[in-house]
Amino acid sequence: MRKQFLFIFLALIVANTSQAQGKTTRIGYIDMEYILENVSDYKEAKAQLELKAQKWKQEIETKKLNINTLKESLKAEKALLTKELIDERETEIKFLEDEMLDYQQKQFGADGSLIHQKKALAKPIQDQVFTAVQDIAEAKNYDFVFDKSSDLTMLFSNKRFDISDQVLRILNRTDKREQLTKKQLKDQEAKESKENAIDENPALQDRQKALDEKKAARDKLIEDRRLEQEAKKKEYDDRRKAIQAEREAKKNGTVSETAKTTDAPKTTDATGKTVTPAAAGTETTPATPAVNKAEERQKLYEQRKKELEERRQKIIQEREAAKKAKEAETQKANTTNN
């Protein structure tokens, strides 16, 4: 059947081309699945339908578990039951299995509720798409417009003949026009004229695509810089607050929360012994992240300084040893000559 349809379709194209006598045949296509997935009303309704389908699946799983429980119970008690009781239980299980299969077929079968509701959900939008396609075809003199997601097999399709985005713009414009003022409507029409000009000229399409990509890259760079500046500002504020807290603590003659974590003060009890805040019943407060970073940097600096000093001392020792060895060799050579 499909081969016959393709043959008739090709014959019509050949006939139309010969009758046009040099006229260029304009062909476009749409992707209905792509359009539906980008319509907000359809996406919301589809999400609700998926929740309903999930509920049906859970009901089927519950029925299956109930049937399996009955089977296991019958298997365990079969030796104690009479033949009449066994037949009665097997009949009940068979009835529940048939009921479960009927329910599954009713909801998810080829003619089930899920398929019918999907069709009902898509039909209003498909009607709007068909109307938009007719408007585009008449305005831009398309001879044929196909649906890429239909049964018609398209072995190759050039993206510049895809008018799906134009159809989406028309659908979105229809929803927005009802809420626009006169000035906004005028601006919208100017924007539509510009978009139509871009659609008509492939060179303008490529140029606009390049501009959009540059703008997206620039926006991403600006956003990354903004996040980096915010992180630096937060780190600076944390460090400033920690330093200010230490100064206030020193000014008031107390110990800051940061100092408590690094050097816990000692107190004396009634017997004269020194005790730590933990022994006295007090608790220490963790240092802020900024102060911890400052302490880590100070420790690294001290460690680096120590390593450099050790290396310097090692070099001095090696030089002294080499010098002594050379003096010993010289003295030995002089003794040998004498």
Image (cartoon, grey):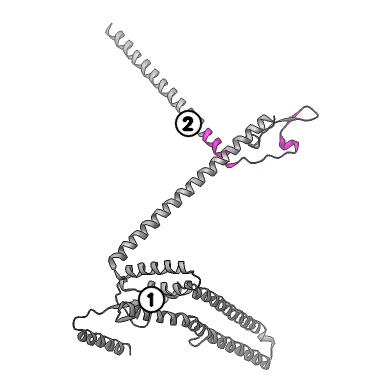
244 with respect to 158 (left or right): right
Q: Residues within 10 Å of mark 1 (few under 14, many from 20)?
A: some
Task: Write down the region rendered in magenta.
Answer: 271-299
Which residue occupies 60% across, 80% down?
59
The quadrant in which the C terminus is found is: top left
Image coords of residue 12 (percent x, y): 26, 87
What residue sits right under mark 2 in the picture?
304
Which is nearer the eye, 70 or 124? Answer: 124
Select label 1 or label 2 by which is in front.
1
Q: Quadrant of residue 148?
A: bottom left
Quarter where residue 289 is shown: top right
Q: Nearer the viewer, residue 136 or 34?
A: 136
Residue lying farthest to the front in this orientation: 182
Count of marks placed on residues: 2
Of the image marks 1 and 2, the number of the one nearer the N terminus = 1
Mark 2: few/some/many CA within 10 Å (<14, 14-19, 20+): few
Placement of the N terminus among the 4 image quadrants: bottom left
Q: Is residue 232 above or below residue 326?
A: below
Quickly name the residue at label 1.
31
Is-magenta flag for residue 192?
Answer: no
Mark 2: amino acid: Arg
Q: Amino acid at mark 1?
A: Asp
The vertical placement of 274 against 99, above or below, is above
SS for dot 2 = helix
Residue 272 in magenta stretch: yes
